[in-house]
Amino acid sequence: MAIRNIRELGDDILRKKCREVKEMTPRLEELIHDMYDTMYEAQGVGLAAPQVGILKRIVVIDVDGTPYTMINPKILETRDEQSGSEGCLSVPGKAGIVKRPNYVKAEAWNEKMERYEVEGEGLLARAICHELDHLDGVMYVDLVEGDLYEVGAADDEDEE
């Protein structure tokens, strides 16, 4: 498998709507494996296919050691609300406050093209919403309340 380049804010592909997956192919299986490798290497909790330059409705998520491959995902139900810090591998070094549902129920297809449902609260609900937005060309920076702020390396510089 391989680590793929993550597209960054300003790349037109991140603003395009993705196409549905009709059938699993060896090429798509390789893409999914590469997406996991890329996400883990970048220390992310989710990655959508357009972030690696592919306009297919595929996301991978792993917030707690349970990986979810979501092909042609759709949100079925949301409840309650959470407001919290959110970042994105396509917007390195930045974060912002975003309101999301606190509970999400979604349907998707796995690598075997078997339908399944996933329910999540908190970070998993946030990750599902964030990654599914990518499939429609929406980025968290469009939803931020207030301004983006610096994260990461700048925080480390304060410690001596």
Image (cartoon, rainbow, N blue to C red):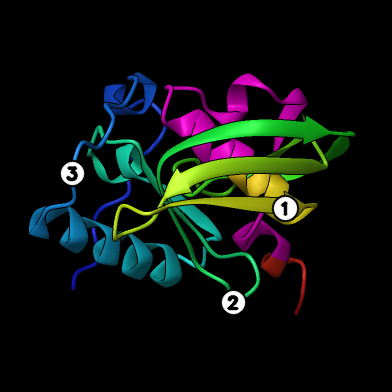
Q: Does the rendering let one see residue 153?
A: yes
Residue at point 68% right, 42% down? 105
Q: What element carries label 2?
A: loop
Q: Residue farthest to the left?
A: 26
Taking 58 as reference, is 24 left or right?
left
Distance between the alpha carbons at the discs numbered 3 and 2 = 27 Å
* Residue displayed at 90% across by 34% down: 80
- Left of 155 or right of it: where is 57? left
Residue type for callout 1? Gly
Q: Quadrant of residue 16?
A: top left
Tell me which segment is drawn in magenta. 129-155
Instruction: Tell me, yes or no, whether the highlighted magenta stretch contains residue 6.
Output: no
Label 3 or label 2, whichever comes before in sequence order: 3
Residue 88 x/y as whole percent? 54, 45
**Crowd around label 2: few <14 · some 14–19 · many ≥20 (10 Å):** few
Query: In this figure, which residue is indicated by the disc labeled 2?
Result: 65
Foreground mark, 3 or 2, reads 3
Seen from the viewer's position, the closer of residues 119 and 37 is 119
Residue bearing mark 1: 120
Q: Where is residue 73 in the image (x, y as percent from the top left)?
A: 46, 38
User: Is residue 150 in view?
Assistant: no
Q: What amino acid is found at the position of numbered circle 2 in the picture?
A: Gly
Give the residue at mark 3. Answer: 23
- The residue sitting at 76% across, 32% down in the picture is 78
In front of the other: 25 or 50: 25
Give the image quarter of residue 76: top right
Could you tell me the amino acid type at mark 3? Glu
Give how far across and how far down residue 110 sits, in percent: 38, 56
Q: Residues within 10 Å of mark 3 (few under 14, many from 20)?
A: few
How far apart marks 1 and 3 lie (CA) works out to 26 Å
